[in-house]
Image: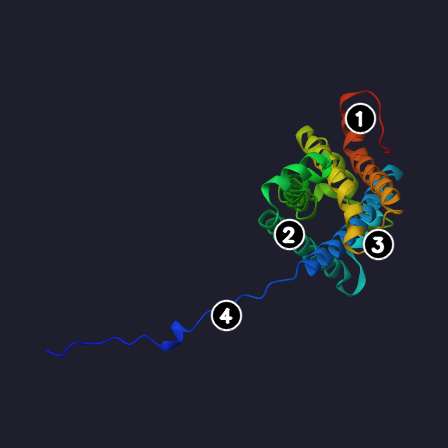
Amino acid sequence: MRSITFRVPHILFMPKYPRMRIPSIIKKYLMAITGAILTVFVLAHMAGNLQIFLGPNAINEYAHKLQHLPYGLLWVNRIFLLAATAVHVWMAILLTAENRIARPQGAHLTKSVQATLSSKTMGLSGSIILIFIVFHILHFTVRSIYPVFQTDAFYTTLNGEQIYNVYKMMVDGFSVTWVSLFYIIAMGLLCMHLCHGVSSMFQSLGLRNKKWRPRLHVFAHIYAWVVFLGFIAIPVAVLITKYTSINLLPL
């Protein structure tokens, strides 16, 4: 009886070529640039949301115009921001892993003592903020967490046209206490993240020197606090209106 020999294609034994590695300087540039994009978006998003204090018509008309931007610009913007977020997170993971490998244990301990709370918690705050972004999209954009947001009760008439009642959705959404508390905590972490991230962004782009370092540090803290106070103003106003006799929201 003849024996059967199996021949494995020689290509399986070809030497493995090293994977292409992204230089550290490119990673830092990508993280800084995407961070700058997201920083500008956060401020614009906050300014748009604060129109709720101008009344239902103002915020509803603003949201309606965004939803009906020409040439599909809304989805272009969404995809662009999601891509920037993905690259920012990816670069953060790669740089963190790279720094841990390159830094001796002693140097790590010395730097840890000198680092600020914001810089030491960048990984933790960034991870929770990422979870919050997913929740926020499901909550107010996809509206899947509370399917009632998709019903006819959340539509109103403005200038003879039936449009979505974003004002009612935001008020009802933040009337759920745990949701508002989660938003406030997430914005606190975002504030901490921005305190260190905005200043580091300028350093990564080579725009920070010894003279401008303290000024950019102050700017980063002011910017972070403006964003924090601006975003929490809405859930705080809704909760105060809900639990007290003080009405902070225009009807």
**Which residue is nearer to you in this view: 172 or 225?**
225
The earlier-in-sequence mark between 2 and 4 is 4
* Residue at 67% in and 43% down: 126
Name the mark on residue 95.
Answer: 2
The earlier-in-sequence mark between 4 and 3 is 4
Residue position marked by numbered label 1 in the rendering:
241
| Mark 3 to mark 2 CA distance (whole Å) | 20 Å
Q: Tag 2's secondary structure?
A: helix
| Mark 1 to mark 2 CA distance (whole Å) | 45 Å
| Mark 2 to mark 4 CA distance (whole Å) | 23 Å
| Mark 3 to mark 1 CA distance (whole Å) | 45 Å
* Residue at 81% in and 56% down: 206
Q: Are marks 3 and 2 in contact (CB under 8 Å)?
A: no
Residue found at the very far left of the displayed protein: 1
* Residue at 76% in and 25% down: 242
Query: Around disc 1, counting alpha carbons within 10 Å, would you say few (fewer than 14), some (14 to 19), or many (20 or more)?
Result: some
> From the viewer's perspective, is the residue at label 1 or at label 2 nearer?
2
Across and down, in percent, residue 36 comes to: 78, 53
* Amino acid at circle 3: Leu
* Amino acid at circle 1: Thr
Choose top left, top right, bottom left or bottom right for residue 56: top right
Question: Is residue 146 visible in the rendered structure shown here?
Answer: no
Say which quadrant the N terminus sits in. Answer: bottom left
- Residue 226 in the figure: left or right of residue 137: right
